[in-house]
Image (cartoon, rainbow, N blue to C red):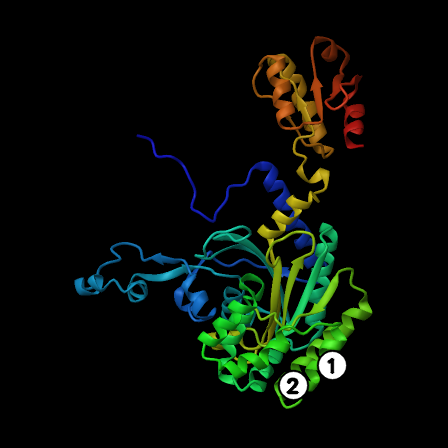
């Protein structure tokens, strides 16, 4: 009995039309990255687990897809170890590689491994898939593309400013209205100090980062479960719910964090980024959001997240500053900052808002009808001429009934059909049919190409 075909949950197939839309997304982002001087690299789909483990926090480690060793992967594993069914211990014995969780850690590994070849500061972008063993749900997939841009080898906050300009430019080109949210891990560290829970910064950031998903009550319950006292959770509430303009929030937080040198430094960094961008006139909203935490442990400075304003969906872009990510690979003191566009969520937003330009999903522009060997032989050089002029065209491969060939053109939404019979061949011309209006014209190949190009 034949196996019923299917794909793993959290993954998707993409049709030709969907791929045209996805390529529009990738090409738009790629073009903006190039405008700002970023260069493209690629890294392998799989990395050594030693590269990936311990870089994303305990929750992130659980979401890594691990790859069984080749060959007899059970050799060397004692029967009693199998009987214990300790999955974490067994995974460490059976798996040396894993699928990459994001593009940032592989990039840090790349920088260290190729340090002698790079000119610092190094501005790279990378558009590749990543994998997470997450529970699939709307807007959350197990396989998805990220479109990253990072700058390493520079501490300047102008890099943060430039990355926010890139975000603003990309979403303006897409026609998606967004809110760009900004916070700083130093501010969160200062808050933890202020409420007497400096040692709980990881628990605080992981919990606060879930505010949009699980609500304030559940966040407070998770904070208490993480070891925060009732008093500390109570002192955190006014900060979590702080409202007002960016300047008003900064003014309040300067008073709140007056006793924290780290916290005040985070305030100053956010102030510089917001003031500089304000002078540049972004087309999208920029908001200081003190509940933004981004749960990944490697962030150390400004952190960013982008929300679509007209569609209910999670973050569609995120990123931040990481001061010493390369240190875990033996190259300390290299600062970096980056952003990542969530291409799959952007794809869903553009679909829901119907924002794709019409020409994006246009495939074949001209189909040549095939009436037989002689007619096909006549059409081939005409088709070659049209392709040289940039017209996307094809010939129906078989000498089938006219109705079948026209149905093919309609199914592919081909706007023009070229019909060539004995009369056309004798005159050296082509009958061009506009599939939208039904109008037909007898034209020379040059006239036909000009009409289609217009």
Please give the residue where the numbered disc 1 appears in the rendered image: 251
Q: CA distance from mark 2 to mark 1?
A: 10 Å
Q: Nearer the viewer, residue 113 or 137?
A: 137
Quadrant in the rendering for residue 90? bottom left
Question: Furthest residue to the left?
Answer: 79
For image coordinates 52% across by 70% down, the residue present is: 219
In the picture of the structure, the residue carrying the numbered disc 2 is 257
Asked if residue 15 is positioned above or below residue 23 in the image, the reply reads above
> In the image, is residue 122 above or below residue 131?
below
Q: Position of residue 95 (x, y in %)?
A: 33, 61
Q: Nearer the viewer, residue 442 or 404?
A: 404
- Residue 70 visible here: yes
Q: Position of residue 33 (x, y in %)?
A: 68, 59
Q: Using the image as rendered, state which of residue 439 and residue 377 is in the foreground.
A: 439
SS for tag 2? Answer: loop
Residue 170 in picture, x, y percent from top left? 71, 56
- First-in-chain label (2 vs 1): 1
Corner quadrant of residue 338: bottom right
Sort mark 1 into few (<14), some (14-19) or many (20+) by Cα contacts within 10 Å: few
Instruction: Name the residue located 61 percent from the left edge and 63 percent from the top edge.
Output: 318
Q: Quadrant of the N terminus?
A: top left
Q: Is residue 311 left or right of residue 90?
A: right
Q: Crowding at label 2, few (<14), some or many (≥20) Cα neighbours within 10 Å? A: many
Residue plotted at (59% across, 86% down): 194
Q: In the picture provided, is 438 more to the left or to the right than 131?
A: right
């Amino acid at each position: 009995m034949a196996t019923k075909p299917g794909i793993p949950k959290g993954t998707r197939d993409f049709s030709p039309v969907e791929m045209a839309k996805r390529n529009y997304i990738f090409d738009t982002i790629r073009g903006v990255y190039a405008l700002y001087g970023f260069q493209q690299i690629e890294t392998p789909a799989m990395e050594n687990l030693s590269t990936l483990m311990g870089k994303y926090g305990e929750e992130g480690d659980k979401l890594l897809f691990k790859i069984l060793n080749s060959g007899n992967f059970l050799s060397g594993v004692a029967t009693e170890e199998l009987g214990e069914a300790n999955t974490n211990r067994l995974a460490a014995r059976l798996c040396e590689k894993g699928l990459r969780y994001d593009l940032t850690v592989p990039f840090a590994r790349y920088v260290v491994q190729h340090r002698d070849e790079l000119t610092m500061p190094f501005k790279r972008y990378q558009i590749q898939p990543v994998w997470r063993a997450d529970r699939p749900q709307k807007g959350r997939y197990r396989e998805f593309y990220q479109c990253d841009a990072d700058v390493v080898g520079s501490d300047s906050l102008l890099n943060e400013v430039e990355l926010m300009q890139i975000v603003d430019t990309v979403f303006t080109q897409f026609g998606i209205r967004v809110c760009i949210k900004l916070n700083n891990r130093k501010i969160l560290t200062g808050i933890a100090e202020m409420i007497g829970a400096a040692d709980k910064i990881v628990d605080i950031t992981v919990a606060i980062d879930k505010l949009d998903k699980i609500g304030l009550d559940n966040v407070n319950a998770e904070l208490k479960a993480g070891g925060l006292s009732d008093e500390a959770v109570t002192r955190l509430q006014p900060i979590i719910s702080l409202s007002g303009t960016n300047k008003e929030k900064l003014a309040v937080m300067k008073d709140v964090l007056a006793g924290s040198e780290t916290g005040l430094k985070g305030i100053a960094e956010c102030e510089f980024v917001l003031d500089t961008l304000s002078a540049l006139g972004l087309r999208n909203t920029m908001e200081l959001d003190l509940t933004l935490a981004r749960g990944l442990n490697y962030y150390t400075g400004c952190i960013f997240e982008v929300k679509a304003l007209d569609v209910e969906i999670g973050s569609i872009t995120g990123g931040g500053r990481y001061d010493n990510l390369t240190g875990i690979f033996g190259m300390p003191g290299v600062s970096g900052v980056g952003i990542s566009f969530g291409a799959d969520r952007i794809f869903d937003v553009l679909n829901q808002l119907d924002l794709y330009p019409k020409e994006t999903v246009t495939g074949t522009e001209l189909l040549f009808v095939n009436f037989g060997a002689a007619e096909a032989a006549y059409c081939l050089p005409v088709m070659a001429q049209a392709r040289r002029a940039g017209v996307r065209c094809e010939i129906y491969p078989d000498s089938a009934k006219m109705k079948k060939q026209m149905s093919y053109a309609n199914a592919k939404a081909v706007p023009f059909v070229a019909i060539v019979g004995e009369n056309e061949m004798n005159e050296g011309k082509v009958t061009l049919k506009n599939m939208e209006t039904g109008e037909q014209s007898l034209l020379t190949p040059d006239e036909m190409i000009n009409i289609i190009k217009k």
